[in-house]
Image (cartoon, rainbow, N blue to C red):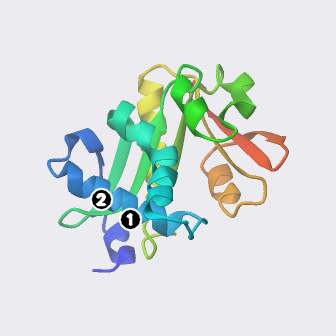
Amino acid sequence: MTAEAMTAGGDIRLERLTALPGRDAALAALVEIFFASTTRTEFASPAERAAFLDTWTGWYVAEAPRDIWMALAGEGLVVGYLTGCKDSAGSVELARRIPKYEVFADHFTAYPAHFHVNVRPGWRDHGLGRRLVDRFAEDCRSDGLPGVHLVTAVFARNVGFYQRAGFTDACQRGPLLFLGRRLDT
């Protein structure tokens, strides 16, 4: 079945990583989708590639697996994921790992949660990313958080997607763009 047929038919389900019986398979799919989605494609060694993955996903898998949402099609094919953190200010380890993490730290009180979302090529442009983002936002709202944010590049192709998803509070610093979505209104 095609991505369009699956998403149109509602056969996509969203599950927490921690609720999946095949966690190792789901994590392997996350890695596959991550590397299919990143703009960086060349690495000097397998160790450098592994370190790059760890920089962007390692903390979430180790420290916040309950805030990882997986989009599954049909019989369990992972077609997208969202890694989230509900306490950006309190996640000191992320500031050590992720380059320029603290550039927008002055916005973490109003928008304490953040996320990264990726969808498998061939499954994009069918609303899966939006469903993942909305599910994480609803989870954050249920926890009483006032807002959620993400950081992207000023001219990234995903800016319009996030703006359509309600991320209207923006702040630019150099080439980076902070986008926030209020949850308490």
Residue 18 location (% of width, % of height): 24, 39
- According to the picture, the residue beneath numbered tag 2 turns out to be 28
Q: Amino acid at mark 1?
A: Glu
| Residue 122 percent location from the top left of the image | 44, 76
Q: Is residue 126 visible?
A: no
The residue that appears at 36% across and 67% down in the rendered structure is 7
| Mark number, residue 23 | none
**Amino acid type, callout 2:** Ala
Residue at (44% x, 37% y) in the render:
59
- How packed mark 2 is, by other alpha carbons closer than 10 Å (few <14, some 14-19, many 20 or more), is few
Drawn side of residue 93 relative to residue 151, left or right: left
Q: Would residue 163 appear left or right of 90 to someone viewing this image?
A: right
Q: Which residue is mark 1?
A: 32
Secondary structure beneath label 1? helix
**Above or below for 148 versus 184:** below
Q: Position of residue 183 (x, y in %)?
A: 56, 29
Q: Are marks 2 and 1 in contact (CB under 8 Å)?
A: yes
For image coordinates 56% across by 27% down, the residue present is 88
Left or right of residue 162, residue 44 in this image:
left
Quadrant (top left/top right/bottom left/bottom right) for the N terminus = bottom left
Which x, y percent locates residue 25?
A: 22, 57
In this rendering, would 148 be left or right of 34?
Answer: right
Q: Nearer the viewer, residue 38 or 123?
A: 38
